Image (cartoon, rainbow, N blue to C red):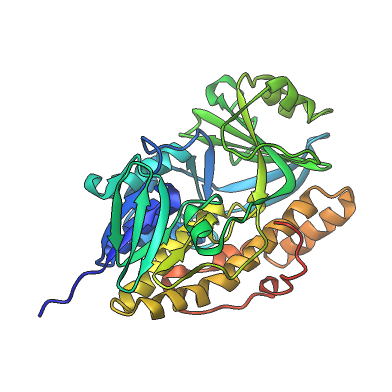
Amino acid sequence: MTEKTLSIGIIGGGLGGLATTIALTRAGFDVEVFERAAALGEVGAGINISPQATRALLALGLGDRLEKTANRVTGQIQRSMYTGEQLAETTMVKENDLEGRFGSPYYVLHRADLLGVLADAVASDRIHLNHHCTGLEEEPDGVTVTFANGAARTFDLVIGADGIKSQVRNYLYGEESAEFTGQMVWRAQLDGKAFSPDILGPHGFCGWIGQGRHIMSYYLRGADVINITTQSDAEAWVEEGWSIYGDPAEMRSGFPDATPQLQELLDSITECSKWGLFGRKPSEKWGRGRIQLIGDAAHPMLPNAGQGAAQAFEDAYVLGRWLQANKHDYETAFAGFRNVRIPRAHAIQRQSLLNSKLVHAGDWEERQATFRKRESEGDTPLGLGWIYDYDPVKEWANRIEYPLSFELAASPTL
């Protein structure tokens, strides 16, 4: 008798949802993904894929697509926003080492390009647009999902990959409004060909640090585009969202006394967007029964370790391995997934918070001492070596406890 292939419905067709669709399809499941929007798309912005997340995507068969689309990062420079003084440098490659310092490439690319890479790896009839999840009903042998367009589908398992405003999470745990973290972000993109080739330094990736604020700038699509992302401490609540129109003059006013190179970039901005950063404290509310959360639906985090999408990719790969190893025992698979992923995600949430405080600190000597100490120990200035060294392909079944996995109850808002 042929065993039934489990059907899995994934709610959310963003980066994490599509990566999970790929992982679970490769693992042999009948997978469909549902996206509320009328078309797959990401607001124009850059995204980082750190080495351990690259390992997961390579294992999902996406290596050739990524290599053709993304920029490999050789390193990152951090400078004073006010003087241009180099504060730190992170080297991502060693001499004659194409795979990079951490054993796998560090990529940057346009979000829309990355979404295209993922979508191209999913059969078109598996992607359903205009499907806004409005409800779920747990039954003994499945989960029925209802949509705003009147459709209803029943699956053996459901994965909530629908972001920080997750409808799936709201169904499981009730309405939980995300909390403003006291930080806001501006984004802009510039014509890379309009500037001197050395404006972003030797790696084409430069951060500018000031008191209570910083700016990250790097090339996309070769050197065609310069991506600008800023982050500032803010007391005022800013509407949550990715694409709220911003005033370039207001954006520039938040970065006074900039060094000439940085000012040249800021003065060239004619369009920008802004949004507030929202989050939740680390939680073990990641799912129940036949329903599992991943990505921001489970563990939203500040961008100060560059790990939002990267952690969704780790989720996708590890979940695929657990379900593949326990094809007809989803309870064991989901429990194993959470046992492995929760301490790591919690630690990275906390690292992101600590980095936001360190980078924006008024005590420059303390920050520089921290940077120097970490570099002398072989770490990155922002203490991210332990994140990059992780290999989800080898460690997918292993629970690893990190010092930052603990002391979570007293953590401030993330």
As displayed, is residue 179 above or below residue 273?
below
Please tell me which residue is depicted at 65% across the width and 65% down the height of the picture.
282
Q: Is 191 above or below relative to 166?
A: above
Q: Residue furthest left?
A: 1
Q: Residue at x 32, y 57 (%)?
A: 22
Left or right of 212? Residue 161 is: left
- What residue sits 64% from the left and 67% below the top? 347
Residue 388 location (% of width, % of height): 56, 62
Q: Is residue 175 above or below residue 77?
A: below
- Front one among 402 and 89: 402
Q: Identify the residue shown where x is 34% and y is 66%.
A: 157
Q: Quadrant of the N terminus?
A: bottom left
Question: In this orientation, does residue 100 appear?
Answer: no
Name the residue nearer the viewer: 184 or 147.
147
Q: Is residue 26 above or below residue 110?
A: below
Q: Residue 376: image x %, image y %?
A: 74, 64
Residue in front for this viewpoint, 84 or 323: 323
Placement of the C terminus among the 4 image quadrants: bottom right
